[in-house]
Image (cartoon, helix red, strand yellow):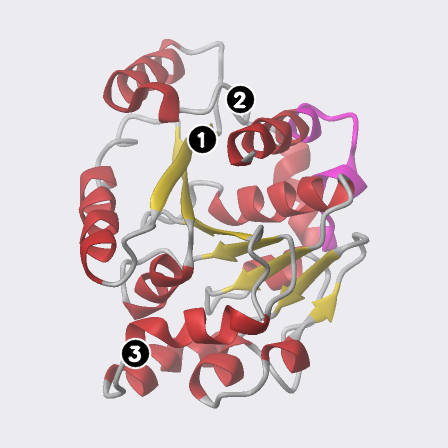
Amino acid sequence: MRKTTQKIIAVVNQKGGVGKTTTTINVAAQLAAGGASVLLVDLDPQGNATSGLGVLKDHAITAYDVLCDAQPLAAGLQPTSVSGLFVLPSNPNLAGAEIDLVSRDRREYALRQALQTASHDYVLIDCPPSLGLLTINALSAADLVLIPVQAEYYALEGLSQLLNTIQAVKHSTNPQLELLGIVLTMYDKRTSLSENVRDEVQKYFGDKLCKTVIPRNIRLAEAPSYGRTIFEHDKWSKGARAYKALGKELKDRLS
């Protein structure tokens, strides 16, 4: 039975390479470090959140089996090296879910149905870089949306399409869906471009833009290859300090 205080957060951007998975992993780890029970649902067939947490992708039960074969959520959950943080792993099989679900009734609600048994304080969903049926499932299941946006010239390109999709989901399958925030990633304060992008996003989204920005940081880029969060890889790095601050900011917004 779902906890009444539980928050389900979809981390979404249909553009690849914006720091979406890095943000999902490290926000989840930071929430867990505060004593919360956290589930990360890897809904990307690439399985980068799974491997980024040091979990193998070849488990008997993955996100595909839970979504398409009605396997119980609990059977797929894997512990991570972070106390209190669990992951529902993903692998390339999940790419077939788009095809397998499309002919089903209530196909947009497959993930929502699966998460009914989640007893965690927070559920974070790492969405694929597309606006297909998997992302629609995530948005239909979520209470809130977090959008990582890269601080680059084309940052706002595609955002309007994403926001239109969120509005469409809000009007059709999930009226409670709200925008939690937009977080700027790969931010370089030495460049006027990053500052200009921040000003532009601020102009459009006001206080929905998170105060915390995530800097370009080599330690952040390295951490997933070791299967570690940034806090395990280098807790004193700029990236770790930024994600610690972002976790606190989001927790304040959630409460």
Q: Name the residue under label 3.
A: 107
Q: Is residue 111 left or right of residue 168?
A: right
Q: Quadrant of the N terminus?
A: bottom right
Identify the magenta region.
226-241
Q: Please, what secondary structure does the residue beneath circle 3 have?
A: helix
For residue 205, what is the image quadrant? top left
Q: What is the number of the mark on residue 212?
A: 2
Q: What is the number of the mark on residue 183?
A: 1
Q: Is residue 104 above or below residue 149?
A: below
Amino acid found under the numbered disc labelled 2: Thr
Q: Is residue 47 above or below residue 35?
A: below
For marks 2 and 1, give the CA distance: 7 Å
Q: What is the number of the mark on residue 11?
A: none
Crowd around label 3: few <14 · some 14–19 · many ≥20 (10 Å): some
For marks 2 and 3, give the CA distance: 36 Å
Q: Nearer the viewer, residue 120 or 206?
A: 120
Amino acid found under the numbered disc labelled 3: Arg
Q: Which of 229 and 27 is in front in this view?
A: 27
| Dot 2 and dot 1 residues touching (CB under 8 Å) | yes
For residue 77, what is the image quadrant? bottom right
**Residue 239 is a magenta residue:** yes
Is residue 58 visible from the viewing direction of this image?
Answer: no
